[in-house]
Amino acid sequence: MTTLHPMLTKPCSPWMLGAPLYMPAHRRDLVDIANGEKLEFLRSMIFCTEDAVSNQDIARSLQHLGACLPDFAENSGRYRFIRARNPEVLAQLLELPDIEKIDGFVLPKFSEDVFDAYFNLLQGTAFKVMPTLETRAVFDGQAMIRLRERLVQSDIFPRVLMLRIGGNDLMNVLGLRRPRGLTLYDTPMSYVIAQLVTLFKPYNFELSAPVFDYLNDTATLQKEIQLDLAHGLTGKTAIHPDQIPAIEAAYAVGRDDYEMALSLSDDDAPAVFKMHNSMCEVATHQQWAKTILNRQSCFGVTLCNRQGEYADISS
């Protein structure tokens, strides 16, 4: 049985992963990145054996990972995942010496069809997983409900760190690609994301924000991140290291929101009060407040000098 990794034996906020960076599993500098000697600002990384690796490079990538794992530091201060190409590749990865130095796996093209294949392999281990919703089934609400009913099982749910939304794969199913200058929410994906949020978030699943394809359009990236946050998404995948500072800076909490979240979490707060020209209601804003405080613990507070004082407006 695989040795329990410290991350997997205690609760972990998905915000701790920041903006994960995908990279091909056959990169020559894998060990340096895994140990923080290169790209030291990374919070998390995903070594890919799927879309970032061609068919002829799969064997080489697995061999390279196997050679690198013994040199992974035990306590690197960052989270390391492998994106398994399919259940067959996951089986090979689980046989690699020192695989316990990996925090978990991204499960691509995840659906009912591969559910048992993946989770049967993971039985007896403590690895966290991030299933990726990116197949045609995602457009079928009933299929997603059936998938949710299986994911909430008591022996499965604790293993699921978050569900990843495969924006590009879903657009590909539609025969589309996001146009330059438009956010994903200006495309049919707006409906898809909203449906996934309403189907999974009420059952305490976290969902990740899809990648942003363009490296020279910071304005649209920033707009998309704000819409991600408005939909309750976290962990926006980065396709290039240059995107990470922009994404994680946007995850910092505004001072007004931080102060309202603190007040809403105060045991002595009135049931309803006014603060920063907003109505704050403990009964209905409690989950929002927890999310804000989780974000703040990972990304801090944006610079602002406004003072927060609340006035009871219940009478």
Image (cartoon, helix red, strand yellow):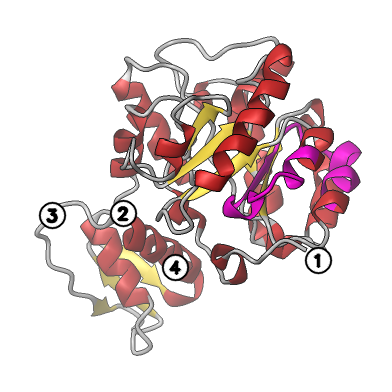
Which comes before the other along the chain, label 3 or label 4? 4
- Residue segment shown in magenta: 92-119
At mark 3, the secondary structure is loop
Please identify, in this view, whether the residue under mark 2 or under mark 4 is nearer the observer: 2
Q: Where residue 127 appears, x then y in whole percent?
A: 68, 56
In the image shown, does 62 or 126 lie closer to the viewer? 62
At mark 4, the secondary structure is helix
State whether residue 51 is above or below residue 314.
Answer: above
Distance of mark 2 from mark 4, alpha carbons?
Answer: 14 Å
Image point 73% across, 14% down: which residue?
55
Q: Where residue 56 appears, x then y in whole percent?
A: 72, 12
In the image shown, does 79 or 220 lie closer to the viewer? 79
Distance of mark 3 from mark 4, alpha carbons?
Answer: 21 Å
At mark 1, the secondary structure is loop
Give the left or right position of residue 43, taking residue 232 as reference.
left
Q: Is residue 91 visible?
A: yes
Give the left or right position of residue 268, taking residue 195 as reference.
left
User: As shown in the figure, which amino acid type bears the numbered disc 3?
Assistant: Cys
Image point 41% across, 63% down: which residue?
294
- Which residue, given by chain and number where applicable, does mark 2 sit on? 299
Please identify, in this view, whether the residue under mark 2 or under mark 3 is nearer the observer: 2
Q: Where residue 293 appears, x then y in whole percent?
A: 37, 65
Q: Is residue 232 visible?
A: no
Which comes before the other along the chain, label 2 or label 3? 2
- Which residue, given by chain and number where applicable, does mark 1 sit on? 155
Distance of mark 1 from mark 3, alpha carbons?
Answer: 44 Å
Give the label on residue 304, or none: 3
